[in-house]
Amino acid sequence: MNLLSETPASPTPTFFVRDVPVYGDVILAPMAGFSDVPYRAICREHGSAMSYTEFVSVEGVIWKSKRTRRLLAFVPSERPVTFQIFGADEDQIVTSCQRIEEWGPDIIDVNLGCSTPNVAGRGAGAGLLRDPAKIGRIFARLSRALRVPVTAKIRLGWDDDSRNYLQVARILEDNGASLIAVHGRTRMQNYSHPADWDAIAEVKQAVKLPVIGNGDVKCVADIDRIKRQTGCDGVMIAQGAMGHPWIFQRRDREEVPFLEKTAMMRRHLMAMVDFYGEETGVVLFRKHAVRYLRGTPDVTQLRILLLTRARVVEVMQAIDAYEAHVCEFESGVWQDKPGSWKLEQTLALDSLTSHLCSPISELSLGV
Ligand SMILES: Cc1cc2nc3c(=O)[nH]c(=O)nc-3n(C[C@H](O)[C@H](O)[C@H](O)COP(=O)(O)O)c2cc1C
């Protein structure tokens, strides 16, 4: 059974990436360490209009690393799926994009925005923004060499003195790019500086390509605001979607009932275990778990349990006990003092089996 309905959310595509239709206007951003198969599938199910993989390095592709292959796994129901790649060397970028094209993406995206020193500092990611002519050469070659559309995710420039986003956007368009996602910050502004949506509006005005606006979209009202302010075709959400797949259903965190959050935690955990195996799945789930719990009451003890338990059954027990505790609190029969709940409930094995039967456990690799 697929997680997603076979029928697109809307009969008319919201926009096209060259000849690839996209239904919907809100998209989970690529996030290394977060936007893996389980979380992307959950977000697609909740209305994210397409999938971007986490970025992979050209070296990982060329050296045929197992990890890279896993990072580019996807489930068919995620389509349209975009593979994202980063690198600094023109030849390596072209060669590795040709190789990953064989692994079945609908679109290939080149990262021109990563700000971390070990990427941008060696001329990849946002480092490429310092050499617009090189960007032009790379996209001219890629658009000739690839059958699938090639797109870019950019920042506004390296720093405030080199905000060359309009020049870069025009170069991308002139050299065969099919979409530009614009993160409205410079490389130096990293992630916390307020995003400049007016600059995204300028890009939208400057090119005929579809433009995705990104940066500082934290709630449903922000989705509508950035669309109004920039005229962008789609909106990409990263930090605002951590532990909050419901944003793709246009529901804010406060609108999601507590029990829906705990149910999603269980389901997400089982999807992680299915995909990675128990040992890795439980550990990788932790960073998601703490984000689902943002704003829920009396959470310190659960956080400690989540961060220290290695078995899926123990994590399930902790979530069940916490859930019971909060429900007691909310129904006004809280016997204990806040913060003093204990992991007393034991989870029967048949109850764990029912978690294991969650539909997301049917995920399989798309490659
Ligand atoms: C943990 C994390 C990992 C990220 N990894 C990637 C990545 O692999 N590729 C990419 O293009 N951007 C990556 N980004 C940047 C986001 O896609 C996005 O552009 C940025 O966070 C701004 O959006 P926001 O304000 O909604 O968070 C990452 C961001 C975060 C927080």
Image: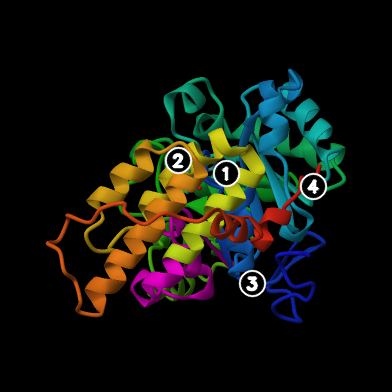
Could you tell me which secondary element the residue under label 1 belongs to? helix
From the image, tell me which residue sits under label 3: 24
Residue 179 in view (yes/no): no
The span picked out in magenta is 234-261
In-front residue for pair 141/264 = 264
Tell me the mark number nearer the camera, choosing from 2 and 3: 3
Asked whether the residues under the numbered discs 2 and 3 touch, taking CB atoms below 8 Å apart as contact, a structural biologist would say no
- Which residue matches tag 2? 157
Q: CA distance from mark 3 to mark 4?
A: 22 Å
* Mark 3: amino acid: Gly
Q: Going from the N terminus, do you reach mark 2 or mark 3 first?
A: 3
Q: CA distance from mark 2 to mark 3?
A: 28 Å
Quarter of the figure with residue 48: bottom right
Element carrying mark 2: loop
Q: Residue type at mark 2? A: Gly
Q: Which mark is residue 110?
A: none
Q: Relative to 56, does residue 269 appear above or below in the rendering?
A: below
Quadrant location of the N terminus in the rendered image: bottom right
Q: Residue at x 75, y 52 (%)?
A: 75
Tell me residue 151's x, y (percent): 68, 48
| First along the sequence among labels 1 and 4 | 1
Is the residue indicated by label 1 positioned so its CB lies within 8 Å of ligand 1? Answer: no
